[in-house]
Amino acid sequence: MTQIIFIYITFPSREEAKKISKHLLEKRLIACVNIFPIESMYWWKNEIQEDNEFVIIAKTSEKNFEKVKQEVKEIHTYETPCIVSWKIDNVNSEFLDWIKKEIKK
């Protein structure tokens, strides 16, 4: 059975989030993506930073994670992008079938 994952990635702008999302979709590494505006606070170079960012949640199979990570790292503007995933244990069969159909085999 195909293991579905959601991949969480942050971006400095909506434009970059959309550009990289479209890139991943065109390569068929992900089936779909949601884009959200967020407020972030974090440590960077010994200072607390506060920024408005955008996050995507991309849906794909676990086997595509490394490919997605590599593609994002190659074109992302952050020095240290956040690229994390989590497994989705309970998926309705129609959604699972759709994801499998839309991503690269």
Image: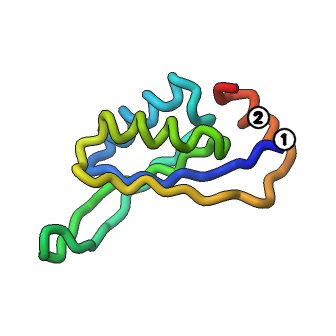
Instruction: State the image coordinates of residue 4 (x, y, percent, origin top left).
Output: 70, 48
Element carrying mark 2: helix
Mark 2 and mark 1: Cα distance apart in space: 6 Å
Residue that badge 2 annotates? 98
Quarter occupied by residue 80: bottom left
Quarter holding the N terminus is top right
Instruction: State the image coordinates of residue 12 (x, y, percent, origin top left).
Output: 26, 51
| Label 1 crowd bin: few (<14), some (14–19), many (20+), radius 10 Å | few
What residue type is disc 2 on?
Trp
Residue drawn at x 60%, y 59% as measured from the top left: 86
Instruction: State the image coordinates of residue 55 (x, y, percent, origin top left).
Output: 41, 54
Residue drawn at x 72%, y 36% as measured from the top left: 99
Q: In the depicted view, which residue is nearer to us: 57 or 73?
A: 73
Asked if marks 2 and 1 touch (Cβ < 8 Å), the reply is: yes
Outermost residue toward the top in this view: 26
Quarter holding the C terminus is top right
What residue type is disc 1 on?
Glu
Q: Is residue 86 above or below residue 1?
A: below
Residue that badge 1 annotates? 94
Left-right relation of 10 to 99 = left
Instruction: State the image coordinates of residue 66 (x, y, percent, origin top left).
Output: 52, 41
Left-right relation of 48 to 85 = left
| Label 2 crowd bin: few (<14), some (14–19), many (20+), radius 10 Å | few
